[in-house]
Amino acid sequence: MLLVLTLLAVSGMNTASLEFIMAGNEQYRQNAFQAAESGIDMTYATAALVPGAPDVTVPGTVPNSTTDTWTTVTTSLAAGAKMSPPPNPRANSFGKFSYFNYEIQSTGVSVRGGRAVNVQGISQIGPP
């Protein structure tokens, strides 16, 4: 009987230890996701969006963290594409505006190899 109880106790400890490691890994994955989101937010706040510009890579660290980092790559897409004509051609400003598309790809990294890649698109309206 003592042997059965010992095996159950050891098995329970191994299961608890594994679940503890799994919970930690999930936390590191969430930290990496939040780091990638921080990179997108910082790029929104500080990026100079220039149509047709080459890719811009910016590294950074998450505020209040010493281990979590992010790297963003801002890409200009389809610079100066004309806007599609609206359904009502009498009351519109068709041909007076262009839109410029950008893509921000942010890679967040946390300890233990936690990694997340988030992609966000931006459209900017400007002169033709």
Image: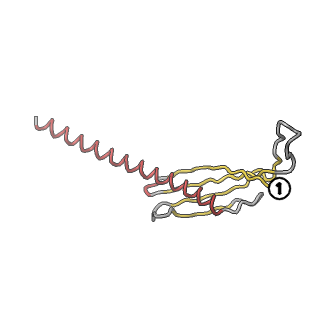
- Quarter of the figure that contains the N terminus: top left
- At which x and y percent is residue 106? 59, 54
- Quarter of the figure that contains the C terminus: bottom right
Q: Left or right of 65: which side holds 102? A: right
Give the number of callouts: 1
Kindly identify which residue carries mark 1: 127
Residue 18: quarter of image: top left
Say which residue appears at 67% left-offset and 52% top-offset: 103
Q: Nearer the viewer, residue 60 or 49?
A: 49
Q: Residue furthest left?
A: 1
- At which x and y percent is residue 14? 27, 44
- At which x and y percent is residue 125? 77, 52
Say which residue appears at 70% left-offset and 55% top-offset: 75
Say which residue appears at 57% left-offset and 58% top-offset: 39
- At which x and y percent is residue 33? 51, 51
User: Compared with residue 56, is residue 81 higher up or lower down, i.e. above or below?
Assistant: above
Q: Nearer the viewer, residue 22 or 49?
A: 49
Q: Left or right of 26: which side holds 13? A: left
Q: Nearer the viewer, residue 38 or 10?
A: 38
Secondary structure under the numbered disc 1 in the rendered image: loop
Q: Nearer the viewer, residue 14 or 79?
A: 79
